[in-house]
Image: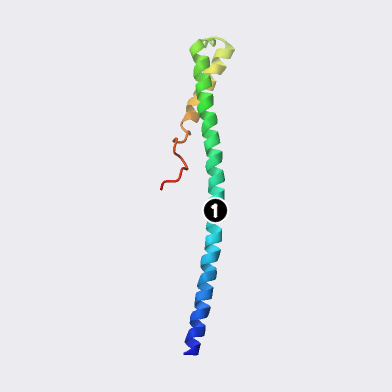
Amino acid sequence: MIILIVILSILVLGLGYVVYNLNRKVIKQEGIIEYQVGYLRKVAYLISESKIYVEQLDEKGAFRSDDEVGVFFNFMKEIQETINEYRLPEDYGKATK
């Protein structure tokens, strides 16, 4: 009987350590994920702001496509359109409870 109690005690302590260790790792990974979500939100904000800025410049019509500046501006608009595909949804990374 005593041997059974000792074996069960060792098993409980071993499993307790496994759970503790896994919990510590999960907490560490959650911190990393929160940092990455914050970073992605900042990048998405910059993409949105640059889109607004390019649209404001384009509304004024100050850049014509027949000169070098106009060609560069059209190229910049194409780049902005490509970058717009990488914008995140507004609720990205928010906890769903």
Residue 97 located left or right of residue 22 = left
Residue visible at 52% across and 70% down in the picture: 16
Residue 50: image quadrant is: top right
Q: From this viewpoint, which residue is outermost toward the bottom?
A: 1
Q: Whole-percent x and y of residue 90?
A: 45, 35
Dot 1: element: helix
Q: Position of residue 59 (x, y in %)?
A: 48, 13
Q: Residue at x 53, y 75 (%)?
A: 13
- How far across and down, in percent of the image, does residue 86 sit? 48, 34
Give coordinates of residue 85: x percent, y percent: 46, 31
Look at label 1 and name its amino acid. Answer: Gln
54, 16: nearer the viewer:
16
Image position of 47 with respect to 58: above or below: below
Can residue 79 be seen here?
Answer: no
Which residue is denoted by mark 1 in the rendering?
A: 29
Instruction: Write the residue at 48% across / 26% down.
Output: 81
Q: Is the residue marked by circle 1 packed among few (<14), some (14-19), or many (20+) residues within 10 Å?
A: few
Which residue is nearer to you in this view: 65 or 90? 90
Q: Nearer the viewer, residue 59 or 97?
A: 97
**At 49% across and 18% down in the image, what residue appears?**
55
